């Protein structure tokens, strides 16, 4: 590159190309995204948040919660799963023999080893996973055969992965989940748990408020700093506030004092409760537990 | 050696240069004095403040209750403000000042439009001040590296553009038309920042950001282009000017440099989308591919650096060469770690841990920070036409910075790795994961303290020099006022 212009041109083309690829193209693809439909229902997703929760997102942003918490769940697998829920009175040993007799069927033959492996260390208690894999035919065939013998099973699509095992999600997060997030708060550090299901894990606003005021009052091992600046400590007087937190003794500020959440705290709690990405979508399918047979 | 040669050597000219060239060089340095002082002084101050805020942020992990009643210094505020101070407050203005001086040197002409960068430096530092105050008050925008709200981002962008104008005008004055490799890197960096910063600010802070996850994609694109590509271009451009000067050998292979600058721009710009992000799959896949290709420029630069900076018989004991060597080693290692983070398997373990934070701090402090500080120690005596007031502290600050960075970053990397492995095992409760990291976090705070001490030495050198210079100006004015009028003037 001999002249300034050629350097300019090279930089212009290089950055321009990446701008088109990583800014313009995603805008075209996702910028006009609309609500999607929840699988096997006619409901739409995501719902616009309530006013309090929408304001709460701004408190979440302002306090920098995303510095320690992510709002994105990863999954590593999704499998057709068959779970044995009831033996219907048969002893476990008989059930095993009964099951073996069906494993020579052409639909099941290829999976006989993996199914028996699942029962290798089985102590006879239910529920137990009989099969988890790609083949839907295995699940349907076995369900049918076992049903005849009065043995109950539940089957469905189950997403797997560490985040899901930790209870942080029931499926991976996808672009559709963030339609109404402005600003989006994905986060990039897990100094605390992921919050994609915070509203499912503790749906009670008061628990959320208590956790914000004194994290160790809710979870002893918590390393979260308390957010007492979101609360007002004042004299209880003759008419205590109905909103005052019910605090365990060691976290209470003192006699005659009460802790009242500010508007910011209430909004933030409403936002946390609104985090419930627990519905199946086309790009993140799973069978919800309530819909299981 | 006669007196002229001696003087020539002092002001950085080769000894066989004629005396006039040396006078030119003195004029060149003098033209840079005020703009560079404005840029460097603010940068050193922000460095100290940024490290202090970083320590305050770390305190939230050592003592969770400490800032429970203090909204300003809660972790989310202090950490964001500290990161932005290190990048926007310290690294960018310091490197830009050095860049301006290099542009003047390569053109062998005084700085063009010397008042413009003075105004620009003040605009920039004003923006940083506003932005920091906004973050601490909870008015951050909520996007990583774009936390400063519009009111702060606008003066910063204006300041950058003004500095770029002065730099490009100076580049236009050059007598030798052929470009030096440093020109490629530094000139491209100027365009890079203006485009990336203005574009992402317009999209995200305009009041009508795009929907949902597109905001995050633009944020990642910007963060990658800022921290990896822009800082890379800036830092390597500076290093490739000074390394040949210090070792007395030309850049080992300009072909490699050309290859590196082109590949860094063309491939590096496509990294940035984390693997597994909740976006359409083609985006992370593209980034992973680009990251793999971006190893090429890093390798080329590593080879070039080793061939140019080592093997010669040049001693450095805490001098500027040490800083720049350390910076380039940091560039190579931190870039490889950064690019490795886009490998789908590795990212699964490391993506939400302190590891990535450590890599970013290494890029900011170990790479661009070290190179900028080394260059400041080299340039300052020339620009002010007098030696550093505390040269021993300057040398000591190299060791403080070097050990500080190692103690700061390595525990974060190792702790992050362990944290990632524990997070990937669902049977380990989250509380155990977090308490396991605390030990490493405590060690890293020791590194922060060392860095803070080193940055205080830098600040001391800069401020004493500035005050001496200002006192000199005042004395000159007083002397001029007190000087007896000559009879001739009284007559007329």
Image: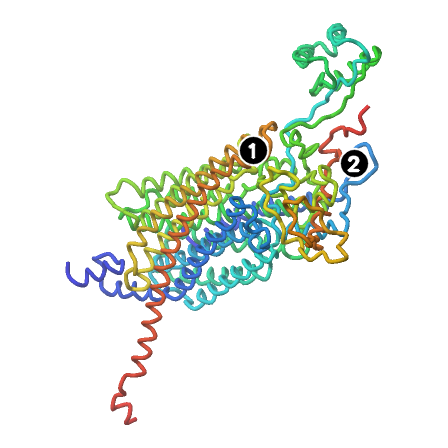
Mark 1: secondary structure: helix
The chain containing the residue under callout 1 comes to B
**Which residue is most to the left?**
B1
The residues bearing labels 1 and 2 have C-alpha atoms spaced at a distance of 36 Å
The relative height of residue A175 versus residue A80 in the rendered view (above or below) is below
The answer to whether any part of residue A258 appears in the image is: yes
Number of the front mark, 1 or 2? 1
Classify the position of the N terminus of chain B by image quarter. Answer: bottom left
| Relative image position of residue B256 (x, y in whole percent) | 38, 41
Q: Which numbered dot is residue B264?
A: none
| Relative image position of residue B159 (x, y in whole percent) | 50, 62
| Relative image position of residue B113 (x, y in whole percent) | 42, 67
The crowding category of the residue bearing disc 2, from other C-alpha atoms within 10 Å (few below 14, some 14 to 19, many at least 20), is some
Residues A62 and B319: in front is: A62
The chain containing the residue under callout 2 comes to A
Classify the position of the C terminus of chain B by image quarter. Answer: bottom left
The residue at which mark 1 appears reads as: B432
**Residue B35 left/right relative to B64:** left
Q: Residue at x 70, y 21 (%)?
A: A134
The image quadrant that residue A237 belongs to is bottom right
The crowding category of the residue bearing disc 1, from other C-alpha atoms within 10 Å (few below 14, some 14 to 19, many at least 20), is some
Query: Is there CB contact under 8 Å for labels 1 and 2?
Result: no
Residues A291 and A265: in front is: A265
Q: How many marks?
A: 2
The residue at which mark 2 appears reads as: A38
């Amino acid at each position: 590159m001999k002249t300034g212009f050629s350097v300019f041109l090279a930089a212009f083309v290089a950055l321009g190309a990446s701008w088109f690829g990583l800014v313009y193209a995603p805008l075209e693809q996702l910028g006009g995204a609309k609500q999607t439909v929840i699988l096997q229902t006619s409901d739409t997703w995501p719902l616009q948040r309530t006013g309090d929760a929408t304001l709460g997102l701004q408190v979440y942003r302002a306090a920098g919660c995303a510095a320690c918490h992510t709002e994105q769940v990863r999954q590593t697998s999704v499998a057709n799963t068959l779970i044995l829920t009831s033996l219907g009175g048969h002893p476990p040993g008989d059930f095993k023999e009964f099951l073996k007799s069906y494993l020579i069927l052409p639909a099941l033959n290829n999976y006989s080893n993996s199914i028996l492996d699942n029962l290798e260390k089985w102590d006879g208690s239910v529920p137990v996973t009989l099969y988890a894999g790609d083949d839907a035919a295995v699940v349907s065939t076995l369900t049918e055969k076992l049903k005849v013998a009065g043995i109950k099973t539940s089957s469905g699509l189950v997403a797997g992965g560490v985040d899901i095992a930790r209870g942080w999600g029931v499926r991976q997060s996808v672009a559709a989940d963030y339609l109404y997030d402005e600003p989006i708060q994905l986060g990039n550090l897990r100094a605390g748990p992921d919050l994609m299901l915070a509203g499912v894990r503790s749906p009670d606003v008061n628990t959320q408020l208590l956790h914000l005021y004194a994290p160790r009052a809710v979870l002893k091992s918590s390393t979260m700093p308390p957010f007492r600046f979101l609360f007002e400590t004042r004299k209880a007087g003759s008419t205590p506030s109905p909103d005052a937190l019910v605090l365990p003794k060691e976290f209470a500020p003192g006699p005659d004092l009460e802790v009242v959440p500010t508007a910011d705290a209430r909004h933030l709690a409403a936002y946390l409760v609104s985090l419930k990405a627990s519905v199946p979508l086309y790009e993140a399918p799973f069978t919800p537990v309530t819909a299981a047979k | 050696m006669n007196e002229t040669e001696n003087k020539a050597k002092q002001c950085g000219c080769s000894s066989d240069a004629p005396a006039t060239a040396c006078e030119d060089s003195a004029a060149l340095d003098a033209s840079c004095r005020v703009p560079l002082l404005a840029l460097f002084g603010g940068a050193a101050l922000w460095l100290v403040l940024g490290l202090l805020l970083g320590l305050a942020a770390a305190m939230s992990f050592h003592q969770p209750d400490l800032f429970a009643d203090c909204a300003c210094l809660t972790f989310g505020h202090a950490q964001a403000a500290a990161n932005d101070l290190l990048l926007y407050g310290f690294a960018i203005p310091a490197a830009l000042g050095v860049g301006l001086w290099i542009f003047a040197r390569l053109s062998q002409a005084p700085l063009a439009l010397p008042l413009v960068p003075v105004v620009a430096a003040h605009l920039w530092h004003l923006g940083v001040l506003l932005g920091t105050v906004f973050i601490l008050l909870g008015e951050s925008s909520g996007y990583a590296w774009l936390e400063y709200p519009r009111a702060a981002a606008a003066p910063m962008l204006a300041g950058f553009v003004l500095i770029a104008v002065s730099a490009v005008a100076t580049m236009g004055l050059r007598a030798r038309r052929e470009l030096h490799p440093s020109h490629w890197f530094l000139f491209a960096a100027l365009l890079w920042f203006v485009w990336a910063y203005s574009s992402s600010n317009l999209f995200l802070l305009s009041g009508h950001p795009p929907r949902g996850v597109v905001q995050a994609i633009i944020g990642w694109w910007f963060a990658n282009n800022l921290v990896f590509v822009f800082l890379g271009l800036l830092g390597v451009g500076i290093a490739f000017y000074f390394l040949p000067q210090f070792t007395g050998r030309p850049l080992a292979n300009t072909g490699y440099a050309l290859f590196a600058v082109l590949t860094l721009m063309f491939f590096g710009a496509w990294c940035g989308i984390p693997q597994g992000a909740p976006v359409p799959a083609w985006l992370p896949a593209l980034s992973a591919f680009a990251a793999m290709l971006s190893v090429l420029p890093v390798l080329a630069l590593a080879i070039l650096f080793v061939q140019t900076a080592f093997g010669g018989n040049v001693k450095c004991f805490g001098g500027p060469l040490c800083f720049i060597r350390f910076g380039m080693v940091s560039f190579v290692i931190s870039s490889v770690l950064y690019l490795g983070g886009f490998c789908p398997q590795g990212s699964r373990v490391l993506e939400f841990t302190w590891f990535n934070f450590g890599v970013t701090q290494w890029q900011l402090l170990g790479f661009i920070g070290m190179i900028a500080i080394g260059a400041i120690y080299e340039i300052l005596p020339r620009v002010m036409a007098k030696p550093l007031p505390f040269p021993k502290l300057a040398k000591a600050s190299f060791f403080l910075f070097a050990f500080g960075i190692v103690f700061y970053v390595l525990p974060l990397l190792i702790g992050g790795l362990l944290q990632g492995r524990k997070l990937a095992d669902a049977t380990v409760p989250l509380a155990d994961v977090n308490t396991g990291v605390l030990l490493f976090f405590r060690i890293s705070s020791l590194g922060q303290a060392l860095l803070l001490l080193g940055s205080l030495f830098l600040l001391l050198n800069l401020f004493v020099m500035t005050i001496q210079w200002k006192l000199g100006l005042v004395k000159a004015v007083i002397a001029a006022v007190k000087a007896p009028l000559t009879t001739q003037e009284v007559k007329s």
